[in-house]
Amino acid sequence: MHRIDREYTAHPFYGYRKMLYVLREEGHAVNKKRVQRLMGVMGLRAMTPGPHTSRPAPDHAIYPYRLRGVKIERVDQVWSCDITYLPLAHGYLYLFAVLDWYSRFVLSWTLSNTLDTTFCLEGLEEALSRGKPGIFNTDQGSQFTSLEFTSRLLSAEVTISMDGRGRALDNIFVERLWRTVKYEDVYLKGYETPREASVGLEEYFRFYNGERPHQALGYRTPAALYQEGRRTQELGPTLHLIPGKNLS
């Protein structure tokens, strides 16, 4: 699973067929069903349309994608979220985060050892405690199509947008965040335990938000751009820059 994660992070357009070829070329004795199963456990799907993308629970409502052709011009115009597999030295976790599209500011993040909805709701609540977006975009994963998740957004009067099936590129900003977090922090540090990962990621997201300049932002930091946008819109006090909670 760790090897699949590294290959997927480097080549997110790989589906199970290409992943199977890579693993076999490296000498791993795996078959198609095992690769499909492990990618399913990890929540991975190729970033191109195809028959093996993630599917929502059949009884959950699906909302249309509302961002095609929309120009992102201000903070809190669009937020999005996603879940990624997080390798540990012995085991793994799942990382959830909420991101502001305009500033790339990480509003919240949470960790879990299961792919349930609870830790996503905790992250959503943390983000909403800082404000709210006009549109909240997700993929069609069952955590995000669940009644608990969608009803919380609707109660906050937030418009829900969902990626088209097999169109992970609709949520490209979060996909780029995962690549950055893994190459700049997770793979370099090789976290041993959930507690170590939680402490390390808190430090990294402080750096990512408040110190790391982004070329796409004119070499400004996400925190500087987000706070400036909030001040301009007169939407409240200065934000804390360390979203997320330690995992005990």
Image (spheres, helix red, strand yellow):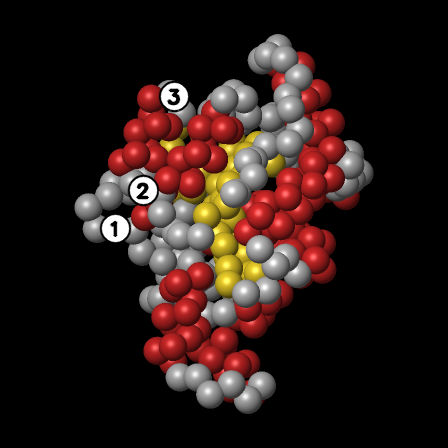
- Between 192 and 221, the residue placed more toward the observer is 192
Name the amino acid type tagged 2. Thr
Under tag 2, what secondary structure?
Answer: helix
Name the amino acid type tagged 1.
Answer: Ala
Earlier along the polypeptide chain: callout 3 or callout 2?
2
Q: Position of residue 77 (x, y in %)?
A: 53, 27
Q: Work out whether residue 206 can be spotted.
A: yes
- Does residue 37 lie above or below 156 as drawn? below
Gap in angstroms between the C-alphas marked 3 and 2: 16 Å
Q: Inspect this view and state whether residue 140 appears.
A: no
Residue at numbered disc 3: 156
Q: Which residue is mark 1?
A: 57
Instruction: Residue 184: give its label.
Output: none
Label 1–label 2 contact, CB within 8 A: yes
Question: How far across and how far down the image is residue 37, in percent?
Answer: 36, 70
Image-based side of 135 in relation to 58, left or right? right
Locate residue 121, reporting x and y percent: 40, 35
The residue located at (69%, 44%) in the rendering is: 204
Residue at disc 1, secondary structure: loop
Amino acid bearing label 3: Ala
Q: Residue furthest left?
A: 59
Reply above or below: 129 against 30: above
Q: Which residue position holds label 2?
A: 145
Neighbour tally class for label 2: few under 14, some 14-19, many 20 plus, Cα within 10 Å: many
Residue at 44% x, 34% y is 122
